[in-house]
Image (cartoon, rainbow, N blue to C red):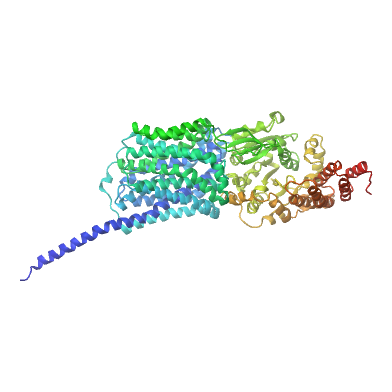
Amino acid sequence: MQSDPDSATIASADRFAGAVRLDTASARPRQAASLGWALIPIVAASGFAGLGYEIVWTRQLSLALGTEMMAVLGAIAGFFGGLALGAFALDELIRRARSAWRVYAILEGVIAVWGLVNIWLLPAAGRALPPLLGSEPSPALLWAGSFALPTLVLLPATMAMGGTLAALERMTREARREARVTAGVYGANTAGALAGTLVSTFLLIPTLGFSGTLLCLAGVNLLCAAGALAVEAAFGTARVASEAARPEPVRELRLTITLFATGLLGIAFEVLVVRLAAQVMQDTVYTFAGLLAAYLLGTAAGGLLWQRSGRPAQDGDLRGLLAATALACLATALLAPYAGRLVEVASLAGVFGELAVAIALFLAPSTAMGALFGLLAQRVRDQRGSVGWAVGVNSLGASIAPLVAAQLLIPAFGTWKALLPVTLGYLLLLPAGWPALAWSAAPAVLALVLWLYSAPSLTRVPSGGALLAVSEGPMATASVVDDASGTRYLDVNGHFRMGGTSSVRSDYRQAMLPMLLHQAPHRALFLGIGTGATVVGGSQMPGVSVHGVELSREVVDLLPWFINPAAAPALRVTVADARRYIAADTSLHDVIVADLFHPALDGSGTLYTVEHFGAVKRRLAPQGIFCQWLPLYQLDLPSLRAIVRSFLDVYPDGAAWLNHYSVRTPMLALIGTRDGGDLDTSALADRLRDPAIGPVVRPLGFAAPIDLLGQYLAGPRALAAFAGEGPRNTDDYPFVTFDARRNVHALTAAPWSLLLALTRGVQPDPAELLAVGAERDALSVRLSAYWRARNRFLEAGAALPGDPRGAALIEAASLGLLEALRLSPEFDPAYGPLMSMAKSLIGSDRAAAAGLLRQIVDAAPSRGEARELLLREFGLRKQ
């Protein structure tokens, strides 16, 4: 019997359709899994670009606004404010859009385009703002201007960034066919941010500069956009129909308060720990990157761990995470006093050792914070269908956190104890009820115990010394310490020594050298004042009014420990960032002196850029002089050469001078003029003989022109040859800032190594220094001999044992100082110590004293003091 063909066809079709349905059903999980895995690189790359932008823009903003605390706070508030605004404004759009993938691609495109626009726009806006604010704006005006600049200039990009997490969360839900993906997306995005922090700081910016890095980050944005569109086209996505409904408002006011407060408390905690870490770490650009990376590592881990747990966002878990966060913050407070020892142990690993210490400080609390935000964001997602509201509220709290930490917590409690109110804040967020008391008992008791203890001091006090005074504020912790000999020092952030009572004569010479090179100075500006000795030294010059600019209020508060206000009654000090002050100043100065800025210290490298040197030149009066002091004992050779190239780019007549002939703390002055011109030695001699000036400068060793001219090290041709070809230090390519690792390493090298590299590598030419005249040839011969004697003196000083005494001292004198004196009998830095040695030996070893005096007379027959002493003490006359 033959079957009905139609029935057979229908039966075959049913079997085929059933097979298709089975294949499709089994394929859906595989497709969702593939789609989910394809999204992970996009989620991570989006976070990579976002943190890369934040690092670049934050540093560019500091160039424009300065590093004063109110400027920093305003910039951070503006950045987070833009994120919050974008999260709020784009939340419903992302939720209701037919394709979240296309919305996300548009957002990444906006970020990329605006990132490229800001290569030009942000620096231009930054140059325009300081003159509008003025050189001494009120704190409120400075904050407002610093808030307005990033808010307005970065707004398209920051708003788009504020919407990307919500878009990525929806894309992941649709791709994986899962409702609870929020914490995982947040964790993966933050893991990408961690990579962006490290790669941008350690690789991209040092290699490409800011503009090149922004180009790379824009490329990452475009790849994310293209990747999202490609994934959507390749796999297709299903949209849940209910997503188009109007989002519900967040039903719990407590949830909104908790999101806001956790954003505030989390960033406040980060600010406080960074301030504490600055007192024991090197405080370079890499230190901050390591601390931020450790914070992000924990945050990412917390988000991913909460996602992996698969738990619903219940009140019990919320209580547990809040209590765990509080307890972890207290653990960091317990660890902080020992951070210095941890740094010493980890110092052998260099920057990776600092990263390990940062992880020890941040990992536990930030992991708890990451899981906590994952829970809260998931709860918002369950109520509203999107996480944008959670991101916006949390970012609002983060935007005011630095202001709360710097202006309220640190002044009220001190940096370390301020961690305890942060802990209390987390406990106050616990949902009410008896379980809250149980969860809060342990952290509350521990916080109370810590509160009863005195705040630990992280200042390093020398053995046998004492801590005399501390000024702690949002910018820094400044301390006055003395050592076993009673010498007093100013330390900033625990270990950066900013001078002391032992260096007053050297500090005075730092002021007098450029003042004497100017023919008639009347107004002098000092950038950076430290202990105030250099500014006070400048105020001793008759007829000169001095003005000092110092970044840290904490340093200014401790000036009475080092200077007597009665000694400098006309001294004026402004607390301001030197770069911003110079950019905003409208006055002209005859002499501008920039102090020794530690090149590795985060922010100091920007004071050695071409742009800053140019801004200083615009503030010089006709015939004005700019003097930039460099600490050779804190610099490596590549940084020194980059600074010299940058200086010569602005001051083509630039010359290098020494401050003194100490090999322990060698200092180099780069001196340039506004208008050029040769040095008038006759006018210099007249000034040194002036009855008002002479008594001021002779005790500093400036009795005759050759005493000053002997410090000349190199002119522009010799300096250019020494610097060679290579990068300049610019605002866009901050070579010195990112050379911090080598500059930190330079601190462990012999302090005279760079000085000797200079004296051996440059050959001063009297023709570059002296004006054409009748006395030029004779003075050139004397100066050439003096410079050779100086270089031999420095070589001898570097060869001395660490603490020369007795026979070692006599040997050094016979081998080094006498050779220097033979090269130039006028070289007082050798003659004076030799005579002191001879006089000290008369009472203990008369034969050695007589022999040394004979050698001094042989080396410098024109100097009568040695001959007279030899005759008077020993009855000997050296013919």
- x and y percentages locating residue 753 in the rendered image: 69, 52
Front residue of 129/393: it is: 393
Instruction: Give 500 or 845, whichever is nearer the viewer.
Output: 845
Q: Would you say 15 lies left or right of 700 here?
A: left
Tell how many labels: 0
Can the viewer see residue 664? yes
Determine whether, in the image, residue 733 is placed left or right of residue 330. Answer: right
> Seen in the image, is 830 located left or right of residue 252?
right
Q: Residue furthest left?
A: 1
Looking at the image, the residue that sits furthest to the bottom is 1
Q: Quadrant of residue 26?
A: bottom left
Q: Quadrant of residue 311?
A: top left
Establish if 695 lies above or below 225: above
Instruction: Identify which residue, 676 or 394, lies in the foreground.
Output: 394
- Tell me the residue at 66%/42% (across/down): 594
Residue 699 x/y as whole percent? 79, 38
Q: Locate residue 477, reporting x and y percent.
A: 58, 36
- Pick out the residue farthest to the top: 566
Task: Give the residue displayed 72% in from the left and 30% down from the top.
Answer: 567
Q: Name the side, left or right, on which 705 lies relative to 188.
A: right
Near-viewer residue (523 or 600): 600
Q: Quadrant of the N terminus?
A: bottom left
Query: Above or below — where is 234 with respect to 580?
Result: below
Would residue 777 be seen by someone viewing this image from the given angle?
A: no
User: Percent position (x, y) of residue 633?
Assistant: 67, 48
